Amino acid sequence: MDRQLNDIEIRVLGCLIEKEHTTPDLYPLSLNSLTNACNQKSSRDPVLSLTEAEVANTLEILESKRLILAESGFGSRVIKYKHRFCNTEFSELKLSQAELAVLCVLFLRGAQTPGELRSRCARIHSFNNVAEVEAVLQEMQQGESPLIVMLPREAGRREARFAHLFGDAPIETSSASCAEVAPDQIAQLQARIAELESEVERLNLKLSHYESQ
């Protein structure tokens, strides 16, 4: 499977996966419905303003990659679209319901913490607690072709965030952030270590002085 997907391709696939599970009676989606789903103001980050032409062009690319299927219903001239991203006879990618829910939310909302995933996956899969989410995240990072990656923890955050590996933007962003912060942190730690070593040496000398009296 081609994992080098751009942001619009990821948004389109995320919407198709979401609607397959949350509104199955309306799935597959027409071009108009899919465009509206891509531009939703809720459950999307970032919020986009794609045109039907942009979505149609993206669908052509995804069809060439064998990631979506276009079909028309009996007696209808409206073409509708469904994904072949995973869990079909055409896809090599097989995911559990929990893994699919996690990946769908990451596609639609960007990097997330385990706590955020627990609440935002609920419409596709219900997690009982954060520990269940963390177990799934751990599994999705394993193997020769991991699906997600844990990003460096941001200052002020209690939980690390996780991003999907079907596009490289989240990884580049986190690497740039890490590159900016890490040197300062290292310098501060080195200075603190030197200070502590000096203090230990001073105390040792003082102790030796008392013992010699």
Image (cartoon, rainbow, N blue to C red):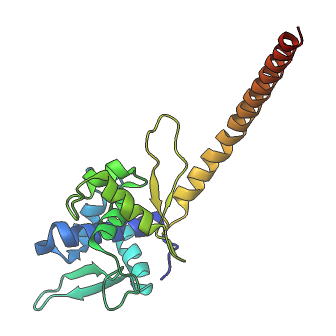
Q: Is residue 9 left or right of residue 175?
A: left
User: Residue at 54% across / 77% down in the picture?
Assistant: 144
Q: Nearer the viewer, residue 133 or 12?
A: 133
Q: For residue 19, what is the image quadrant?
A: bottom left
User: Residue at 34% across / 80% down in the picture?
Assistant: 86
* 206 w.r.t. 112: above or below: above
Percent from the top left, x then y, of residue 23?
A: 15, 68
Q: Is residue 40 visible?
A: no
Percent from the top left, x then y, of residue 126?
A: 21, 60
User: Residue at 81% across / 15% down in the picture?
Assistant: 207
* 199 w.r.t. 85: above or below: above
User: Residue at 73% across / 27% down in the picture?
Assistant: 192
Q: For residue 210, what is the image quadrant?
A: top right
Q: Nearer the viewer, residue 109 or 197?
A: 197
Percent from the top left, x then y, of residue 137?
A: 41, 62
Q: Nearer the viewer, residue 167 or 74?
A: 167
Percent from the top left, x then y, of residue 17?
A: 28, 71
